[in-house]
Image: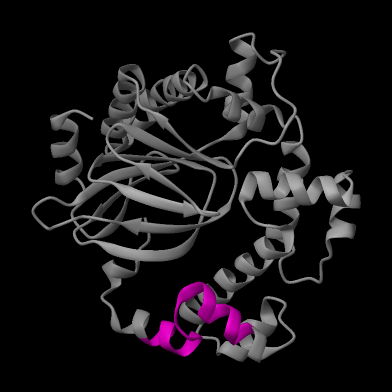
Amino acid sequence: MATDFVEFLNAHTPVEGLTETHWPGLTLFRRSEPSARSSMIYSSSICFVAQGAKWAHVGGVTYRYDPMNYLVVSLPLPVEVEIPEATPEKPLLGLVLQVDVAEVGQLLLEMEEADAQIGRHAQPGIYVSPIHPELADAITRLTKASIDRTRARVLGPGAMREVLFHMLRGDQGEQLRQLALNAGAGRGVARAVRHLQDHFDQPTDVESLARMVGMSTSTLHRSFKDVTALTPIQYLKTIRLHRARVLMLSAGLSAGEAAFRVGYQSQSQFGREFKRLFGATPTQVVREMQASPPEARAGS
């Protein structure tokens, strides 16, 4: 992205971590030092980097996004994130933009592409695509408008529609089109993901989940892994562990209380799986986070 946009982000990200804007769902971020792999949940969003690079690791595949490539996450997805290089003099700078699926669908209707033929197989829930000049220009204008309440309200809607338009016309517009139209095998996977997100604390088995979304057990298992790189049960465990971590950090729950709240029946199993995902015991993670300065706790 252009040098002036890097300077703009540098001037409008005064603290480490995240900076909210006046455009709903648009968040700026700054990181001034590298970070090793850390597990987090990415929501449905578009991630742009203006300076530096980030790596997202999913299912043994590494997705690099940088000033030349942006990341798209089409549904809530567990991701291991890594920042290979960053310094106070040359920090990682970028933004995260939440995707409104309904707005994409409406735009497709106006483009007269809602009935276009699309693939029926499940598309991966994460991908990287090149940033074309038209998309970079629209993102720049949306971001610059977002720091002022009036400009965001008046100029933001048009810039946002232009961002989505250029994404739909881009190299991997079919993934976004399939998500918006809720079509193909991805429909059942999306419904299964929503169910697991909403009912993560309840007992779940793949057979019942498959019946609920109208798929065979084998088809759901295969399509779910194609989209998320995880089986439904692996996905559920990851969601539970992340929710437990939030409960311990924000609500002050003990490891045992958090484990029970998110659906674990065995505290020892919870402890083993927590350490496997986060690289530390629940007690160690809480202690480290409480000792860190507030701005260092923000994710990006």
Residue at (52, 21) in percent of width and height: 168
User: What x and y, as percent, mark residue 252?
Assistant: 50, 85
Image quadrant occupied by the N terminus: top left
Residue span colored magenta: 270-287
Residue 272 in magenta stretch:
yes
Q: Left or right of 115: which side holds 22?
A: left
User: What x and y, as percent, mark residue 6?
Assistant: 17, 37
Q: In this picture, is 288 found above or below 184?
A: below
User: What x and y, as percent, mark residue 185?
Assistant: 76, 36
Q: In this picture, is 239 found above or below 176?
A: below
Which of these two is toward me, 297 or 281?
281
**Secondary structure, magenta segment, majority class:** helix
Which of these two is toward me, 63 or 166?
63
Q: Left or right of 15: which side holds 184?
A: right
Q: Is residue 103 visible?
A: no
Image quadrant occupied by the C terminus: bottom left
Residue that protrudes farthest toward the left in the picture: 89
Q: Left or right of 51: which side holds 287?
A: right
Q: Left or right of 239: which side holds 168?
A: left
User: What x and y, as percent, mark residue 69?
Assistant: 35, 33
Residue 134 in magenta stretch:
no
